[in-house]
Image: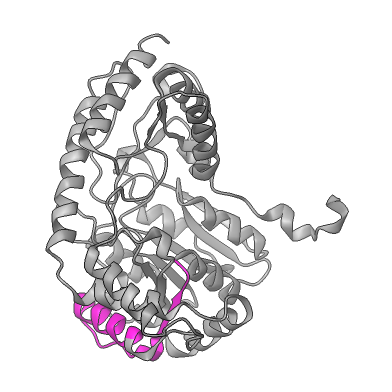
């Protein structure tokens, strides 16, 4: 049967979180209690006003095709939001709405990268970056995110990786899986290095509102960088709308036209009722969003403190997102071995750091998008299990 498949399919990777989820669900089916800290999904429900607006839109008949880049009223709201938070004016024609944030990643790489072009991307990082780079025929060039640098890109190291074959640089801040953040100074230095080069930035800003100290900064706010950048954003993380599949990209108009062609050729459009829910998410009350970030902060503090009491574990305090990335090198096993061991021995589902690239080996990604009670129990179970090694 494999002879049916095109060669390009061998270049396509996967996302280990869903594989670990399947393993954990299989154990639960056997009666084992599992604490799920593997999936990057807020445990909070979608806000009631957002659900109501989406439901009203369905009953109002918004169940038909919509324009491929998105409804003009939805794109205008997104344009206003991006412009307000980043300090410039955005035209709705610079916005393309998609079924989640991943399509912007996929479409951007397909639209920008020719076979043989080099793409610099964070490692450890979201695994779909490397997967789609390879699928497009591009050459993945990982830039290590090191614990000693708070899991930030070393901008001088980035400079050493750039050459005349570099076409795209992917940045993600706050970052999955480490919770690290690029500073404004990092991005200013990056902008200087890129200068007038014909290099595109894909700036994954999906966790921009889940920040605990200070604020996230977008490279598009720097002079000359907006014209070189595609922003990837969406509603899944901030508004607990993972199942709604609602994301968007903000980019120069001429790029948006081509990204829209990819939408037309693949998914046609995003559901109208989903877009109305997105409008409500951005324009409705934000108090509960801020409250949830405070709850994430409390959970972060508890899990970091707890993990650092376990002999052999060292865990930095993340600045954003809802993941910790503890160092477990002292146990002399691979990260995937430790993750499997904790699943079976501790009843806690985590992910091995190598799932996020070679430079993630020796770490675990643990999501704290779960209740404080479950987090405390998970840390206790992890401690007991690791003390047996």
Residue 179, given in percent of the width and then of the height, sits at: 31, 47
Residue 78, given in percent of the width and then of the height, sits at: 30, 80
Q: Which residue lies furthest to the top in this view?
A: 388
Q: How is the structure coloured here?
A: one colour
- Compare residues 38 and 170 and report the one nearer the observer: 38
Residue at 35 percent across and 65 percent down: it is: 190
Q: What stretch is highlighted in magenta?
A: 74-100
Q: Does the magenta stretch include residue 197?
A: no
Residue 364, given in percent of the width and then of the height, sits at: 41, 33
- Compare residues 92 and 146 and report the one nearer the observer: 92
Residue 138, given in percent of the width and then of the height, sits at: 63, 63
Image mark count? 0
Q: Is residue 177 left or right of residue 10?
A: left
Quarter location, residue 310? top left
Is residue 327 visible to us here? yes
Q: Is residue 86 magenta?
A: yes
Q: Residue furthest front?
A: 59
Question: In the figure, 302 relative to 179: above or below?
Answer: above
Residue at 41 percent across and 44 percent down: it is: 39
């Amino acid at each position: 049967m494999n002879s049916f498949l095109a060669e390009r399919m061998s270049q396509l990777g996967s996302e280990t979180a869903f594989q670990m989820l399947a393993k954990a669900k299989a154990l639960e089916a056997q009666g084992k209690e599992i604490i799920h800290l593997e999936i990057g999904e807020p445990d909070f429900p979608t806000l009631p006003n957002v659900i109501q607006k989406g439901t009203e839109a369905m009953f109002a008949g918004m169940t038909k095709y919509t324009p491929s880049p998105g409804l003009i009223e939805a794109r205008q709201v997104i344009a206003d939001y991006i412009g307000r938070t980043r300090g410039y004016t955005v035209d709705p024609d610079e916005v393309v709405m998609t079924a989640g944030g991943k399509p912007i990643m996929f479409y951007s790489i397909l639209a920008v990268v020719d076979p043989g072009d080099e793409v610099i991307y964070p490692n450890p990082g979201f695994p779909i970056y490397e997967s789609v780079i390879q699928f497009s025929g591009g050459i993945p060039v990982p830039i290590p995110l090191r614990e000693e640098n708070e899991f930030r890109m070393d901008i001088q190291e980035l400079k050493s990786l750039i050459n005349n074959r570099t076409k795209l640089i992917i940045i993600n801040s706050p970052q999955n899986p480490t919770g690290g953040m690029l500073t404004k100074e990092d991005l200013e230095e990056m902008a200087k290095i890129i200068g007038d080069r014909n290099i595109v930035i894909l700036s994954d800003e999906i966790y921009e509102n889940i920040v605990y100290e200070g604020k996230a900064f977008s490279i598009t706010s720097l002079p000359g960088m907006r014209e070189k950048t595609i922003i990837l954003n969406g509603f899944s993380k901030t508004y607990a709308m993972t199942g709604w599949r609602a994301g968007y990209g903000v980019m120069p108009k001429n790029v948006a036209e081509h990204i829209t062609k990819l939408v037309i050729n693949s998914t046609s459009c995003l559901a109208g009722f989903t877009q109305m829910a997105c409008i409500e998410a951005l324009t409705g009350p934000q108090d509960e969003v801020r409250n949830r970030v405070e709850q994430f902060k409390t959970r972060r503090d508890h899990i970091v403190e707890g993990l650092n009491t376990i002999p052999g574990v060292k865990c930095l305090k993340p600045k954003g997102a809802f993941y910790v990335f503890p160092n477990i090198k002292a146990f002399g096993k691979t990260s995937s071995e430790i993750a499997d061991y904790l699943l079976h021995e501790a009843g806690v589902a985590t992910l091995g750091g190598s799932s996020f690239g070679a430079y993630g080996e020796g770490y675990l990604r643990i999501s704290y998008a779960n209740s404080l009670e479950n987090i405390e129990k998970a840390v206790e179970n992890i401690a007991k299990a690791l003390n047996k090694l």
